[in-house]
Image (spheres, helix red, strand yellow):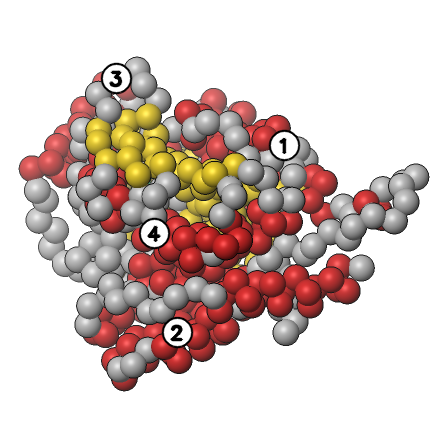
């Protein structure tokens, strides 16, 4: 049944894809690609570079040491939270950490097609939902705002399809610095800070495509409306707890001060069960080491409730696994792997997303598809059609090379194509056609979910 309508549906996507404009020159020299994160993920080894700490970074270390001295070893989750998002000293708070000058690079920063196809995905799901009059685009952890900018350009170019709808944009971002970078890109100055300390919105404005846009620190403050939620490389930075199986049962891995060098940190095993090991590990596991991210679980539950009550869908894209990996906690600094306990605050900290845990935390409130590899999702979304359109419209050889190189980085299974996965949360009735419902006469067939079914042209 699904197969029958696939062709019609995807020729719709093909039409959406080919209707969207030309190459956006934003990447600078082609050499830039040599610095992409994917290549480093593959090639890098621990750096032996001597790390020079700035005052602020050593402040984080001092703060952590003081904390451990007064309350004892801290969990890896507490360490990650302090290092990444502490409002004063956190890694994300005061710097633009993405891109060639930063510590890592992401797919939307590599190729404009990535954000465009996610924009097309929202439009196709909006059509499948019966074209509701209003919808929100909600992005969690928008980085530099590049993905949103590329998706919004698609919305604007598909004006004839979306013309009667009221769209608003909502960004969930903890970093004042990155929210400023996002605002510059998305609004071109049409924004202002709000100074109500109790207000849920801390910044508001109008996008350059004319849509209202607001910034929040927390998803729970975003208005409850029909929404498309996008989280790209967001869940991997949320704090994880780490556990080791021992002959006494599961024990949490904690972070303590190195006894012989008081300015250094080390991992230790909790001698007894901790609150986290008692509450978070609910079943035995074949693995002897696991990582659990309760904050991700809470956010996914929140998304599931919102989708059930108000409609929409959530597209989560990240590197991750289906409950099979063990020790994935690592740091990135200057596009190199970086020891997670050295010079905290100077490197990004990240762990692979456990999609099986996310699925389990939705508690069957919503239906989910995936995780599927990025190259499969983008192929199904018609990336080849988009690439051909851009190549046709590109006049100079440098642009051609850039388009092809960036396509290769995000699609090649040896680079980002396989390592990154797509996972979607949908309302429970999204995949049920009325023909599947008992006692109902023949009704309309459900359309396949864009990106998760094979493209048939
Ligand atoms: N999605 C972007 C950026 C990924 S980096 C891209 O793909 O290019 C992670 C982003 O999440 C940054 O914008 C960071 O500031 C933000 N972030 C980290 N922890 C967060 C939290 N707890 N709540 C909201 N945003 C967070």
Q: Secondary structure at mark 3?
A: loop
Camera-side mark, 4 or 1: 4
| The residue carrying mark 3 has its beta carbon less than 8 Å from ligand 1 | no
What label does residue 390 carry, if any? 2
Query: Seen in the image, is 83 located left or right of residue 240?
Result: left
Q: What's the residue at 40%, 39% (across, down)?
A: 169
Whole-angstrom CA distance, mark 3 to mark 4, is: 28 Å
Q: What percent of the width, then of the height, locates residue 240?
A: 42, 37
Q: Earlier in the sequence, mark 3 or mark 2?
A: 3
Q: What's the residue at 43%, 28% (across, down)?
A: 222
Q: What's the residue at 92%, 39% (across, down)?
A: 439
Q: What's the residue at 27%, 70% (across, down)?
A: 33
- What residue is disc 3 on? 197
Residue 395 against residue 288 in the figure, above or below: below
Q: Earlier in the sequence, mark 2 or mark 4?
A: 4
Q: What percent of the width, then of the height, locates residue 147?
A: 37, 53
- What residue is disc 4 on? 149
Q: Earlier in the sequence, mark 3 or mark 1?
A: 3
Q: Is residue 356 visible?
A: no
Camera-side mark, 3 or 4: 4
- What residue is disc 1 on? 308
| Quadrant housing the C terminus | bottom right
């Amino acid at each position: 049944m699904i197969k029958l309508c696939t062709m019609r549906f995807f020729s719709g996507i093909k039409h959406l894809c080919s209707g969207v404009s030309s190459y956006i020159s934003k990447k600078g020299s082609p050499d830039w690609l040599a610095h992409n994160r994917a290549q480093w993920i593959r090639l890098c080894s621990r750096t032996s570079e001597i790390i020079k700490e700035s005052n602020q970074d050593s402040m984080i270390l001092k703060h952590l040491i003081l904390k451990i001295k007064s309350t004892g070893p801290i969990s890896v989750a507490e360490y990650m939270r302090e290092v990444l998002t502490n409002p004063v000293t956190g890694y994300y708070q005061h710097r633009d950490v993405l891109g060639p000058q930063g510590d890592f690079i992401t797919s939307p920063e590599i190729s404009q097609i990535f954000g465009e196809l996610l924009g097309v995905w929202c439009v196709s799901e909006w059509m499948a939902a019966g074209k509701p009059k209003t919808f929100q685009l909600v992005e969690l952890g928008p980085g530099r705002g590049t993905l949103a900018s590329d998706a919004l350009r698609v919305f604007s170019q598909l004006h004839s399809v979306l013309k009667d709808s009221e769209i608003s944009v909502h960004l969930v971002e903890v970093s004042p610095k990155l929210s400023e970078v996002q605002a510059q890109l998305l609004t071109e100055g049409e924004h202002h800070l709000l100074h109500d300390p109790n207000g849920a919105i801390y910044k508001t404005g109008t996008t350059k495509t004319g849509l209202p846009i607001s910034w929040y620190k927390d998803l729970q403050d975003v208005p409850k409306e029909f929404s498309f939620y996008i989280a790209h490389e967001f869940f991997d930075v949320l704090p994880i707890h780490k556990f080791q199986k021992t002959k006494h049962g599961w024990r949490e891995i904690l972070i303590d001060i190195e006894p012989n060098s008081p300015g250094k940190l080390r991992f230790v095993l909790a001698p007894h069960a901790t609150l986290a090991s008692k509450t978070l590990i609910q079943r035995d596991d074949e693995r002897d080491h696991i990582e659990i991210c309760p904050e991700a679980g809470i956010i996914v539950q929140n998304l599931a409730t919102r989708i059930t009550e108000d409609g929409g869908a959530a597209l989560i894209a990240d590197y991750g696994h289906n409950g099979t990996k063990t020790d994935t906690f690592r740091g990135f600094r200057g596009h190199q792997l970086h020891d997670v306990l050295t010079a905290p605050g100077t490197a990004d900290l990240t762990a692979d997303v456990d999609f099986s845990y996310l699925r389990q935390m939705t508690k069957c409130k919503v239906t989910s598809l995936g995780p599927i590899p990025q190259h499969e999702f983008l192929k199904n979304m018609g990336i080849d059609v988009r690439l051909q359109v851009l190549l046709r419209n590109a006049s100079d050889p440098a642009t051609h090379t850039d388009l092809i190189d960036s396509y290769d980085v995000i699609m090649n299974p040896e680079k980002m194509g396989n390592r990154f996965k797509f996972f979607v949360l949908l309302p429970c009735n999204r995949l049920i056609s009325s023909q599947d419902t008992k006692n109902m006469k023949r009704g309309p067939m459900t359309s396949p979910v864009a990106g998760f079914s094979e493209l048939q042209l």
